[in-house]
Image (cartoon, coloured by chain):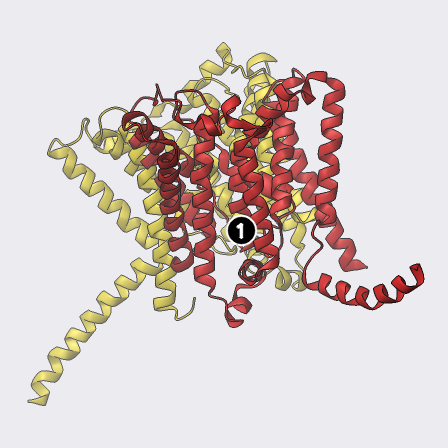
Amino acid sequence: MSITVDPNAAPTAPSVRGRGRVLPAPVTPAEIVLGVVLVVLWAALAFATPAFLSAGSIIPLLVEVAPVALIGIGMTFVIIAGGIDVSVGGAIMVCSVVTAKLMRDQGLPLILCVAVAIAAGAVLGLMNGLLIAYGRVHAIIITFGTANVFLFIGLQIFGSQPVSGMPNTLAWFGRGVAGQTLGVPHSFAITVLLAAVAWWYLRHTAGGRHFLGIGGDAVAARLAGIRVQRRVLLTYVITGVLIGLASIFTLAKGTSSLDQSVGNGQELAVIAAVVIGGTSIMGGRGSVLGTLLGALLVQTVKSGVTQLGWPSQLSDLFVGIFIVLAVGTDLLRQRTRRAG
Amino acid sequence: MSVDTALPTKEKSATHRRANRILEAVLTQRIVLLGVLIVVVVIVLMYLSANGYLTGDYDFDYMSATLIDAVPLALLGFAELIVIVSGRGGIDLSVGAMVSLVGMIFGFAYGQWGWPLWAAIPLALLVGGVLGGINGLLIAHVGFPALIATLATYYAYKSVALVINDQKPINSTQIQDLYSLTGSVRIPLIGDYIPDVPLGVFTFLAPVLVILWLVLARGTYGRRLYAVGTNDTAARWAGIGVAATRMRAYILSGVLSGLVAVYISAEFASARPDAGTSGNGLALPAITIAVLGGVAITGGIGRLAGVLLATVLIVWLNAGIILYFEGNAGSQFQLLALGVVLIVAALLNGLTTSRYRGTG
C-alpha cells in the first residue's frame, strides 16, 4: 500500500518546491520563532503570576492589542510597498474625536458611528496617498507633515476640553460582556478575520503580489505593467480605513470620556509591531501574520510588566530589545544565506 | 521695421531671463527660498503688529527673545542633518529619548552628586556619545536600517530615562541656578543698537555651528560623510572607511543630543525624565526642520545654513502665531503651519527638480 503512494508523491514534490520559490512558505521560520517566543513568554508569565492566564487578564490583553494589530495590517501593506506612515497617531485622534462628538451630540447608532469613523479614516488616508503617490516626495516626509496637520485638525475639533459623557453605543466592541462572544472579544475576532483576509490577498492574488513587487523594485514593477501610483495610493487608503475602525475599538475600550492624548505615540507602536513581525522596512517582503504576532508580543510584554509589579515604563525597554532581536536575527539569517 | 522691433524684444528677453533666473533660484535653491520666506513672514507679522492685529508687540526685541527656542531645535536639526546625510536611509528617531536620558544623568551628576559643571557637561556629552554609538554600532556595523535601530533605541532610552529616577524630575538648587546660562545678554560694543540676545545662542549654538561648519564643510570628515551618503559603494572603492564614517555620524548625533539635554535642563531649571519625549517629542520637529532646511532624505545632500534658516523661519513664524491667537489655539496652529510648510517645501522640491533639471 505504501509503495503505491510513494511513486505518486515523488513527481509532485519538485513542482511544489518550484512553486515554493515564487511563494514563500505559508509560515516563515521567523514567524514560528515569534510564535514560540510568545508561547514561552506566556508560560513564563503564567508561572510567575498565576493570574496571567485567567480570563480576567487575557481578555483585556486581546482588547488592548486589537487596534494596534488592526492598523498594523494596513501598515504592513504600506511598508511592503516601500512606504511608511508616521501620521497614524494624528489620524486616530481625528477619527475618534469626530466619532465621539457625533455619537454624543447627535446620538448616532453603532453602525453609523462605524461608517463615520471609517469614512474619516479613508479621507485622511486618501490625503496621504495622493500626496505620496503623485507628489514625488518620500513617504516619511509627507506623513511627518500630515501628522502635524492631522493633530491640528483633531485638536481643533476637540476644542479646549475632553469629550465626556459619551453614551454606551459602542459596547459591542468594548471590553465588557456585551463585547464578547464565547469569551472572545469582538474587536479581536474582527482583527483576526481581517488579518486572515489580508494574508490571503497578499499571498494568493495577483493584486496582492503587486504590492510586494512595488516594494521590491518600483521601476521594474511599472515596466511589468503594474499601476504603481494607484497601488501605492491604495495602501494608504487601506491603512486609513483600518485606522477608522481601530478608532472605534479605541473609543469602545476606553471610558465614557476621550481626552487629547488619544493616539499619542501609536504610529511607533504600530511600526514596532510590523517590524517585529518580520516585515522588511525596505519593502518587498513581509506578512500580515507576523504583524499580528508582533502586536501580540508587544502587548504581552506591556501587560506582563505591569502584572509583575514592575514600573510600567519599563515595558518600552523590552519593546526596544525585541525590535533589535527580531530584526537582528533576520539580518544574520540573510547574511548567512548570502554567504552560503 | 525689423530694427525697431528687434531691440525691445532683446531687452525684454534679457529682463525676462533675469526674472526667470531669480525664479529658478527661489524654486531650486532651498537657502534662497527660506531667506525669502523669512523676510515675508517677518514683514507680514510686523505689519499685523503695527495695525494692532496681534495680542503683543512683534518687534526685534521679541524676535530676539524667541531665539531661545531656536537653540535646541537647531542643534537637533544639525544632528538629523548629519545622520540623514550619512545615507542609506539614515535617520535618528532617538534624539528626543537621548535628550531625556542624558538630561537625567546630567541632573544626577550636577544636581545630586555635586559634580562641578566642567565635569558634568563633558559627562553629558560622553553619555550622549555612547548612546549615539549604540545606534551607530547597530546601523553601521551590524547593518540595521536606521529607522528600525533608532526606533528600538528610542523605546529603550525613553524607558530607562523614566525608570531611572522613578519618573521624578531632578530640580535641586544647583540645577535651578543653571537658568542663568540661558538668560539674555547685551552684546558688547554694538549692544545699544540691537536687542539683547539669549545667552544660549553664544554659549551653545554659535560654537557648535562653527565647529560643525569646520568639520563638515572644511574638514576631511565632511568630505567622507558626503561621499558615503552619496554612494556607499563608490565611497568604499575610494578607500573610505564607510562603516566608521557612518558610525561617527550617529555618535555626533548623540553628542549633540547630550548638549541639548544640558541646555534644556538649564532652560527649564529642572532635569525632567520626559524632557525630549513628552507630547510629540523632539525628534519629529528636528527631522522636520532638517528636511525643511533642504536635507535630502536619500542622503549626501544638505547644508548647515539651510537647517539654521529653517529653524529661524519656524521659530519666528511660531512666535507670530502665538501672538495672533488667544489662549492655546496658537500652539495648535503652529502644528498646522509646521505641517503645511514641510509638505509644500517638499512638493515644491519634487516639482522644481523635474522642471529645471529635467529628471526626477
A226 left or right of B51 in image: right
Residue B23 image position (x, y, % from top left): 26, 62
* Quarter of image, res A106: top left
Residue depicted at 43% across the width and 33% down the height: A248
Secondary element under disc 1, as helix, strand or loop, is: helix
The answer to which of B149 and B49 lies nearer the viewer is B149
Residue B281 visible in the picture: no
Mark 1, Cα crowd under 10 Å, few <14 / some 14-19 / many 20+, is: many
Q: Amino acid at mark 1?
A: Phe
Number of numbered discs visible in the structure rendering: 1
Up the image or down, B106 lies above or below A72; here it is: above
Chain whose colour in the figure is yellow: B
Residue depicted at 68% across the width and 63% down the height: A22
Tell me the quarter of the image containing the C terminus of chain A: bottom right
Tell me the quarter of the image containing the N terminus of chain A: bottom right
A255 left or right of A327 in image: left
* Quarter of image, res B3: bottom left
Up the image or down, A13 lies above or below A185; here it is: below
The answer to which of A48 and A188 lies nearer the viewer is A188
Up the image or down, B1 lies above or below A186; here it is: below
The answer to which of A18 and B264 lies nearer the viewer is A18
Residue B259 visible in the picture: yes
Tell me the subunit letter for badge 1.
A
Residue depicted at 35% across the width and 22% down the height: A162
The residue labelled by disc 1 is: A77
Q: Residue furthest top?
A: B173
Residue B240 image position (x, y, % from top left): 65, 57
Chain whose colour in the figure is red: A
The answer to which of B132 and A239 lies nearer the viewer is A239
Residue A258 image position (x, y, % from top left): 39, 24
Residue A201 image position (x, y, % from top left): 57, 54
